[in-house]
Amino acid sequence: MPSLTDTEITVRLLAAALLGAVLGFERELRHKSAGLRTNILIAVGSAVFTLMSYEFASESGGDAGRVAAQIVTGIGFLGAGVIFRQGLSVRGLTTAASLWSVAAIGMAAGAGFWSGAVVGTGATVVSLRALEWAKERVLPRDRPELLVELRHDASAASVFGALETLGVVVQSLRHEGDALHLRLRLGERSRTDATAALADLADVRGLRWER
C-alpha cells in the first residue's frame, strides 16, 4: 500500500473538517451541546486515526483497519455522555447518533471515500433538519397537559410508576404546590387508560386535561 503524500493528507483532513463543520453548524442552530467545535474535532480526529491506519499498514504491511476500527468503539463513550433520562423520557439520542455519524463521515474523508463522505453528510443534514421540519408540520404539535392534584405531602412516585407501566412518555414536568403539571405524548385511547390508572391511586386528589 503506497504512502500518502502530504497534499493528499492535507486535503483529506480539510475535507473532514469542512464536512464536520456543516453538521456542527446545524447543531449550533438548534443550540445543542455538541455543536460546531465538537463535530469538527470528531470528524478531524476520526480522519487522523484513519490516516494513521494507512501509514501503519504501508510501513508494516498489516491490516489498515486495526486503528480505525477502534473509532467505532471509542465514539460510543462520547455518545453515552450526551444521553440522559428526564422524568420518564430519554433525551440526547439524536445528538449521540449525530456524533456517531460525523465520526463515520470523518473516517470516510480520511480514507478518501469521497462519495460516502459527501452523501453521508447530506443524508445526515436531511435527517436532522428537513425531516424535523416535516414532522413539525405533518404531526400534531399540541400535546395534552395533564394536571394531577396530589394529596398533601403525597409522593409523585406512584404517578410516575403508573404512567411508566402504560408506556406513556412524559415530555415535561412542572411542580406547583400539591399539583403536578405533566405534558404527555399519547393518543386518545392512551389518554383514557392513563386517566383511569391515575384516578385509582390513593395519592391523587384530582385530574384535569388541558391544552
Image (tube, grey):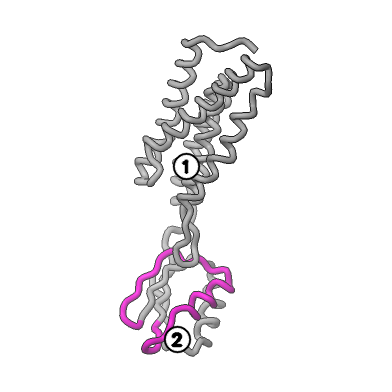
- Residue drawn at x 35%, y 83% is 178
Magenta segment range?
A: 149-178
Give the CA distance from mark 2 to mark 1.
40 Å
From the top left corner, tell me how far across and down residue 63 is, in percent.
68, 23
Q: In the current view of this chain or complex, which residue is farthest to the right? A: 62
Question: Can you identify the residue that label 1 sits on?
Answer: 128
Q: Is residue 59 left or right of residue 43?
A: right
Residue 175 included in the magenta stretch of the image: yes
Q: If the image is split into quadrants, where does the N terminus sit?
A: top right
Closer-to-camera residue (205/135): 205
Estimate how packed mark 1 is, as few (under 14), some (14 to 19) or many (20 or more) residues with alpha carbons within 10 Å: some
> Under tag 1, what secondary structure?
helix
- Marked residue nearer the N-terminal end (2 or 1): 1
Q: If the image is split into quadrants, where does the C terminus sit?
A: bottom left
Closer-to-camera residue (37/164): 37
From the top left corner, tell me how far across and down residue 25 is, in percent.
37, 35
